[in-house]
Image (cartoon, rainbow, N blue to C red):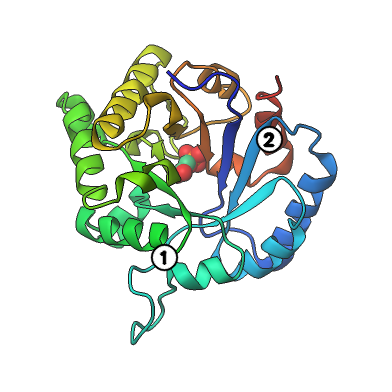
Amino acid sequence: MKEKNKDLIIAGNWKMNKTPKEAEKLINKLKTKNKNSACKIVLCVPFIDIPLATDLTQNTLISIGAQNCYFKKNGAYTGEISAEMLKEIGVEYVIIGHSERRIYFNETDEQINKKINSALNSGLKVIFCIGENLQERENNITEEKLIIQIKNALHKVDKSQIENIIIAYEPVWAIGSGKTPNKDELDHICQIIRNTVFNMGKILPEKISVLYGGSINSKNAKEILTLPNVDGGLIGGASLDIEEFLKIINCTAK
Ligand code: PGA
């Protein structure tokens, strides 16, 4: 069960969308139109938008996240960005293990584990994504799959750091598809995720944050975000449209 009265987290995952000019417009609108301070807003923006995004959100309740980082601190790794570099320019969160990175960039659990350790050691909070694909769901191995992903990714993570990890449950078949799990199934899976992390760390189950991601929109947000085991949402497509994103944020008003 999530902690009572804890603010929900609404994280936007912009993916490879929004040029700096477009990012500036969206963030300025969000700042002027958002009247709800009852949730934590995190914008996970493309690397190129980060300096502007951290500037524009200074002294606001909006935090900035990246969508990936490399696990080495520095060195001859052409094209990569380290967690330490992100931290220095004001990034607070980083998404690690998104299914698009696993599928299109062949990221493995082992690499994800190294990235998580490196991000935590650099002082970033991690939004760690897990999820089963359609075939795994149809074969009824969703729970096993999620438990393996969690165990592999959190291997050698210091127990005291577990509270800096937010787990985002994102079924691969739900991402960008308009489909979502039914609410009982979703709540049950988030409970299993909570218990699995609890068994690995020193952290109380209610202190763990479990987000849901996959086709959240302004119509289904309230039902999903009020589930007992869901601490917030990771929102892709619907975070790119400011009116839609604001409606989702407003679902969290207490
Ligand atoms: P979606 O994406 O909201 O567009 O389904 C979610 C995600 O991939 O994080």
Residue labelled with disc 1: 69
Query: Which residue is outermost to the right?
Result: 32
210 sits left or right of 238 in the view: left
Q: Quadrant of the N terminus?
A: top left
238 sits left or right of 84 in the view: right
Taking the spot 73% from the left edge, 64% from the top edge, the residue there is 55
The front one of 118 and 172 is 118
Taking the spot 60% from the left edge, 39% from the top edge, the residue there is 238
Query: Which residue is outermost to the top?
Result: 184
Position of 78 relative to 130 (above/below) = below
Where disc 2 sits, the SS reads helix
Indicate which disc, 2 or 1, sits on the residue closer to the N terminus: 1
Disc 2 packing (10 Å; few <14; some 14–19; many ≥20): some
Looking at the image, do the residues carrying marks 2 and 1 touch, with CB atoms under 8 Å apart?
Answer: no
Where disc 1 sits, the SS reads loop
Q: Position of residue 62 (x, y in %)?
A: 69, 48
The front one of 165 and 249 is 165
The front one of 60 and 18 is 60
Q: What residue type is labelled 2?
A: Glu
Position of 39 relative to 92 (above/below) = above
Q: Where is residue 143 in the image (x, y as percent from the top left)?
A: 21, 27
Q: Which mark is residue 244?
A: 2
